Amino acid sequence: SLSKPTVIAPWVNYLRRSVALDGNASSTARLDGSESNPRLVLRAISLSRDYINHMWTPDFLGHFTHAFLIRDPAKTISSLFDKWPGFDELEVGFPEQRALFDLLKALHGAPPPVIDSDDLLEDPEAMVAAFCQAVGIPFLPEAMTWAPGGDPSAHSWWDGGSFHANLAQSTGLTPQPRRYVEVGDAPERVRRVYRRMKPHYDHLYQHRITPV
């Protein structure tokens, strides 16, 4: 979510695993700076432990301009299983993301903007421009690139930052073809989690924004 001023939003638990872990940059965008001089910053966030749905009151949620980044659970769950074989289904986050989306839609009478990670990586500039238009901030082409470097462990509580290793080496969002991930060869426990999470992803996917 975009904050007024900068605050990390409750749905960010999902973003830690969104987009990356398969050779893509793992990051999320937020607004940093005053309304008169906004600056779009890409930053990895690691807060998957911090479920705060008990704070989802209309007053609290009203402090934010909300947007959602989603990723095909076949990719999310297979990446998670690769890095964290013993993950618990309750830590995946898709039901919580859908619950927050539905709550915001009910509160505001319209769905918040949704970006699918495959769309973002296939055409980064067009999708970021569409996102900026959807949330009412200027699109800055220079924000699409950045200098590589940094210590991934500074952004992660898990195993020294391996979830964000690709981010530290990245220089921007670059076009990448869609890649299908097969979960059929995964253990039954992982396939079961995928089957349960897919409807939540599909629910948000139907609301995704497309390039302007």
Image: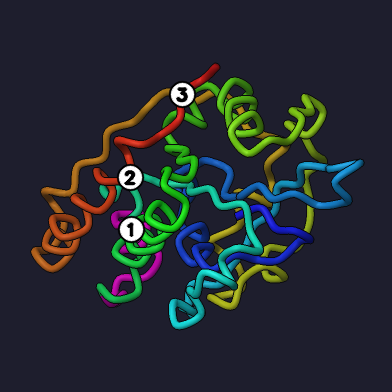
Q: Please determine whether, in this image, residue 63 is positioned above or below residue 111.
A: below
Q: Secondary structure at mark 2?
A: helix
Residue interval drawn in magenta = 77-88
- Residue identified by numbered label 1: 98
Check disc 1 and give the amino acid type: Arg
Furthest residue to the bottom? 54
Whether residues under marks 2 and 1 lie with C-beta atoms below 8 angstroms apart, the answer is yes
Look at label 3 and name its amino acid.
Answer: Thr
Residue picked out by circle 2: 204
Q: Is residue 100 magenta?
A: no
First along the sequence among labels 3 and 1: 1
Q: Earlier in the sequence, mark 2 or mark 3?
A: 2
- Residue located at (52% from left, 61% from top): 16
Whether 87 is among the magenta residues is yes
Element at label 3: loop
Quadrant the N terminus occupies: bottom right
